Image (cartoon, helix red, strand yellow):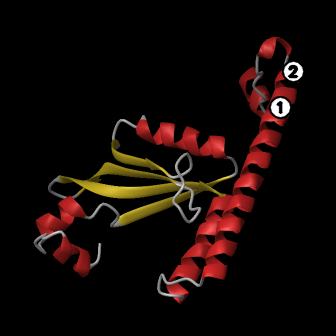
């Protein structure tokens, strides 16, 4: 949050105010191959005993008007100090490779033009968002089909563990 936003929101500039109001002082970006991976990772994070979900913004199901897609989580995590434990906000952005490529390009364009993007570039960026989304959907479908074939190859839908032979032999000796 910029100092201008602090003034707009009438927030005091103090350590306590920063701790309470800045939710992205720590940021993590997770890039996945498939959209389904995004939700699986989100679920895993949300079930961590030491992680508290604060907010969740699903820009995949509800993209921003410019085409931006990603899943944003704000979580609170414990940070262990020598004399205490502090809860710290962390922003986690989870997206596919295609979403990440689009977001990176969009970010460069927005900063180059100071958010006043020429109309033709704005249209091209929106078209690129559609292409990235189409790619994600196609890859997700291929992934699903490959998994279905794998399940058919497994008798009784029971996945058997695969251990290296030297690992198994170490128990026999």
- Residue 33 in picture, x, y percent from top left: 70, 51
Q: Nearer the viewer, residue 67 or 153?
A: 67
Q: How many marks?
A: 2
- Left or right: where 59 falls relative to 47: right
Residue at 57% x, 57% y is 69
Residue at 17% x, 77% y is 7
Camera sees residue 164: no
- Give the farthest residue toward the front: 119
Q: Nearer the viewer, residue 169 or 173?
A: 169
**Is label 1 or label 2 in front?**
2
- Give the farthest residue toward the top: 156
Residue at disc 1, secondary structure: helix
- Identify the residue position indicated by label 1 in the image: 165
**Real-space Cα separation, disc 1 to disc 2, in angstroms:** 25 Å
- Residue 97 in picture, x, y percent from top left: 68, 59
- Identify the residue position indicated by label 2 in the image: 152
- Left or right: where 88 falls relative to 72: left
Camera sees residue 142: yes
Residue at 50% x, 42% y is 42
Residue at 69% x, 47% y is 34
Q: Residues within 10 Å of mark 1 (few under 14, many from 20)?
A: few
- Left or right: where 93 falls relative to 106: left
- Residue 84 in picture, x, y percent from top left: 16, 53
Q: Which mark is residue 26?
A: none
Upstream in the sequence, badge 1 or badge 2? 2
Q: Give the quadrant of the N terminus.
A: bottom left
Q: Nearer the viewer, residue 170 or 60?
A: 60
Residue 108 versus residue 154 in the image, above or below: below
- Residue 32 in picture, x, y percent from top left: 64, 52
Residue at disc 2, secondary structure: helix
Asked if the residues shown at circle 1 and circle 2 are in contact, with their CB atoms under 8 angstroms apart, the answer is: no
């Amino acid at each position: 949050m910029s100092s201008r936003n602090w003034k707009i929101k009438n927030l005091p500039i103090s350590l306590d105010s920063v701790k309470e109001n800045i939710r992205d002082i720590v940021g993590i970006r997770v890039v996945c191959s498939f959209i389904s991976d995004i939700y699986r990772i989100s679920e895993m994070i949300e079930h961590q005993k030491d992680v508290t979900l604060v907010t969740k913004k699903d820009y995949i199901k509800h993209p921003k008007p410019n085409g931006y897609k990603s899943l944003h989580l704000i979580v609170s995590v414990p940070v262990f100090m020598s004399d205490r434990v502090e809860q710290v906000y962390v922003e986690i952005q989870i997206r596919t490779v295609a979403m990440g490529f689009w977001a990176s390009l969009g970010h460069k364009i927005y900063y180059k033009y100071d958010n006043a993007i020429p109309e033709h570039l704005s249209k091209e960026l929106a078209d690129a968002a559609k292409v990235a989304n189409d790619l994600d959907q196609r890859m997700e479908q291929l992934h699903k089909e490959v998994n279905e074939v794998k399940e058919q190859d497994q008798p009784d839908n029971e996945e058997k563990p695969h251990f290296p032979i030297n690992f198994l032999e170490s128990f026999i000796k």
